Every structure is written in C-alpha cells, then in structure tokens.
Image (spheres, rainbow, N blue to C red):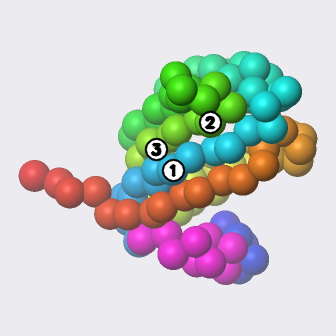
Amino acid sequence: MTDKDEKDNDSYNIPEGEFCVYGTVFAVPEHADKVEAVYKETTRLAQAEEGVVYYCLSRDTDDPSIFHFFERYKSKQAFQQHNDQDIIQKFVNSGWMKDVKAVFVKPITP
C-alpha cells in the first residue's frame, strides 16, 4: 500500500486490524439494474478474495434505486485490494451512483 493509499484510507477513519463497513448506495434510478448486476458480480468475486471475511449487498424493497451493504475485512490492505479491482473502479467512475453513505467500525468479537 502506498502512502497515498494509506492517507485515503485514513480519511475514512478506517480502524486498524479487522473492521466492518456498512451503509447505503443511492443509485441513479435508471441505472439501478446495472448497479445490481455489478453487485452480483462483486459478491461472487468477494467469495474468493483473501482478506474479505463477509460481503453482503441487498436491494431495498421499497426503493429499488437504494442498495444496502455490510462488509467485513481483515485489514485496510484487504479493503484497498478489493476496491482496486477493475470492476469496482469502473463502477465508481460510471456515474451510476448519486451518493454513498458508509460507516467504518470495529466488529464485536467473542
């Protein structure tokens, strides 16, 4: 991870070590089906990603342009590697999202 990546991650207040991120993606309504297709593929890919503990996305039943996510990573590096994938970068730059609200937290462990 470069110093720039570390600074970018710190701007999100990502906890050290294992952490969770949850929140909501607000899609541009006419692109919501495309967003779901991307999320289906990223969910499939996440199953094989080292450092991804849990990756869950869902589409809101009341407003299909809203998506909810809950993700758990072993480290900032794992999170960065996930986000550096071409599919994620293309999605982020697609213009299909109006807004994203994300919260980064430490998981409660036994």
Mark 3 or mark 1, which is nearer the start of the sequence?
1
Nearer to us of marks 2 and 1 is 2
Nearer to us of marks 3 and 2 is 2
Residue extending furthest front? 62
Q: Position of residue 64 (x, y in %)?
A: 64, 25
Whether residue 18 is situated above or below residue 11 in the rendered picture: above
Task: Give the amino acid at mark 3.
Answer: Glu
Q: Are marks 1 and 3 in contact (CB under 8 Å)?
A: no
Mark 1 or mark 2, which is nearer the start of the sequence?
1
List the residue tagged with mark 2: 66
The quadrant holding residue 87 is top right
The label number, if any, that marks residue 23 in the structure image = 1
The label number, if any, that marks residue 91 in the structure image = none
In terms of secondary structure, where does tag 3 sit?
A: strand
Q: Which residues are magenta?
A: 7-15
Nearer to us of marks 1 and 3 is 1
Query: Residue drawn 46% across and 50% down?
Result: 22
Task: Give the amino acid at mark 2.
Answer: Ile
Residue 50 in view of the camera: no
Mark 2 or mark 3, which is nearer the start of the sequence?
2
In terms of secondary structure, where does tag 1 sit?
A: strand
